Amino acid sequence: MGFNYIQEKYLLLTSAWHKITVIITIFSLLLILYKKVVFMSSQLAVFSSKGLFKHRKRLEETRNRFLFNSKDPSSIRSTVYDSWIRCLQSGIDPRRKQTDDPLNTEDTANIIRRSKLYDYSIATLNDLLIQAQETNYILTLCDSQGRIIFLGGNRHVKQQAERINFVLGSCWSEESIGTNAIGTCLKTGYPVQIFAAEHFCEGIHDWVCSSSPVKDPVTKEVLGVIDVTGSWQDAQAHSLGMAVMASQVIEYKLYEQTIIARSQLMENYISAILRYPHNGVIVLDAAFNPIQSNQFARRFVNQISGQNLERLWTEEGLNTCLLHYHNSEPKNDEYEVFIEQFGIPAVIQEIYLNAQRIGSMLILSGSKQKTPAKSAPENTPWNKILGKSGSIRSAMTQCNMVADTNVPVLLFGESGSGKELFARAIHQISDRRKGPFVAINCGAVPKELLASELFGYDPGTFTGASKTGRKGKFEEAHQGTLFLDEIGEMPLGFQVHLLRVLQEREVVRLGGSLPIPVDVKIIAATHHNLEHLVNEGQFRADCFYRLHVVSITIPPLRERREDIPLLIDHFLDQFARKYDKPLPKLEQTVREFLVKVYRWPGNVRELQNCLEHAVLFCMNGTILREDLPKSIQAKFINSPWLMDNVYDPGPKKLSICHEKEVLLKLLQDSGGNLSAAARQLGVARTTLYRHLEKYGVGKTR
């Protein structure tokens, strides 16, 4: 729910229609920034380089009083005071001179090699080192346990730091060396600067350190700490700002990677629900938390527990259970698990990106679910959209991401590309799937009737109207989805009425005066370039921006040719069954032409019609050129590709009749000039002579 909420707010901000929302959001961000500045001030130990000696002296006196049973918190910052209390409770020796000895070189190297944080931080750290080299500071990166996995900076300062074991592989958690910026930052999860005698152990009093946490952008778990450390005499307030800036840059890089990983997980999820249409499918992040699940998984969990999946997952700690399986199983990409709370076996499929595990797919056993496969709906959300190309899967992924958001979706696609199928799929996977799906073609309804179709009318509104009145499409789609197909065809003058309904979420029937609230998800579709129509004055800009919150482009068939063989096999099987005919085959060159050459201006619908025509007229079990619709036959005969493949030295040969037709047309185009015809074919004249004799075509010149 949280992810969908954030996503919905982001999508709303992308619309120019929501400028006011943007202004309010900017104001809110400035307020948050102001609060952060105030908070940061409370985490600073020094505000100026002046008076550092006196400040250190006062801190030493305060620390001594604290150690000798004067626990007055008023004279010390609360962050430091709370840390000192923890140190006393943990039995830390305040006289310690250094932290424990570091790990050996091999163990440290292994930690660094396995660290995702190190990989995403190293470029930023190297950039900051250029600044640190010119100061008396050293820059470090520590993991979530406080172990230093990167250290660089001023050579002299590094030599001084070795005396307190501030070196690669050493641990600077509070448990190891008491109050220090690294350990206290890990404990609190906030940036902090620790100066001189604020350190609990006296061996660290000659130092000032500033640390900022690096958090996982999704879970907010502290992954590690950026630290800037130097001599107490060189203490500066800006060192904490430097650490905070570095941690935020790294967090942004982690966020970018999270978005890429999330996109990859959703691509795999789409593949899984298409591959297992009757199984429960749950996609999990790297920590085994659920990201998305299909209707079978949600229904099954609700049946066995009476709870939704997310709540059951949290209350039962299922991520911990699956993590245990992951750590105990041999390192296989796929393995079986038994989830006690479900009472069924399941399969885990690991998902990798750049050789790194980014999540998993949990496939619930279909045969043992209380919702058996045979009782599943006949039409699963995506089973009518065939394709494995990246472009079609990307469109499906986007649909899954916005299905549960309450924002308008605008589908762009050429005629016949499947816009209504996508709209229905979005409805079926959304939280409105139990509500109605109502579709209307805005270009097919006369403009005089469009208002009554969409908004309905009260009794007696006009001659011939129903005596009881009638609901419009908006009311019919209440708590469901309204699909406005061919929105680009909607009359310009009518768009203002649509805009009002979209804004107010209520309709007034024709002839009526009472506003009727409507709760609908709007999906609109068009084959037009609406932005161009806006510029031409044929579509209202305000209506466009209201609808254009989320736009998804459905690729034309010619841009996903790898899907055509799959579609061909599907339609051939479908129409062979429909007309009770043997399953036909496509003649090789016909198949190659349909897959590789023809541009399919009518997209999937044209391919479907083409193959239905071919199945009907196929007489010998093999579909030839003559069985195709006349318009496609003409393109076939006149295609340069066909001529290029007549004399292909490879195994792909055209049929004899096709070769003869091409030769005759070629001779006709060349005016009977054999030399010109041979040059166009790329063969010797003697080769052309042999083929002319073979087909009984007389030589001309």
Image (tube, rainbow, N blue to C red):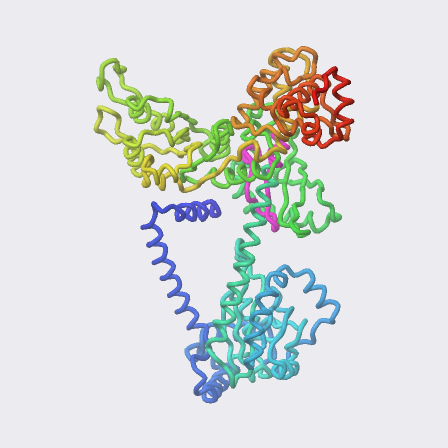
Q: Position of residue 524 (x, y in %)?
A: 41, 33
Q: Position of residue 673 (x, y in %)?
A: 67, 25
Is 520 displayed left or right of 404 in the figure?
A: left
Q: Write down the quadrant of residue 271 in the picture.
A: top right
The answer to whether residue 71 is magenta is no
Q: Is residue 29 above or below residue 410?
A: below
- Location of the C terminus by quadrant is top right
Is 167 displayed left or right of 189 in the figure?
A: right
Q: Is residue 512 visible?
A: yes
The magenta segment is 271-300
Q: Write down the quadrant of residue 112 in the picture.
A: bottom right
Q: Is residue 369 visible?
A: no
In this view, the residue in front, 180 or 411, is 411
Q: Position of residue 593 (x, y in %)?
A: 64, 26
Determine the residue positioned at 63% across, 32% down. Answer: 276
Determine the residue positioned at 70% across, 12% down. Answer: 620
Is 479 displayed left or right of 169 in the figure?
A: left
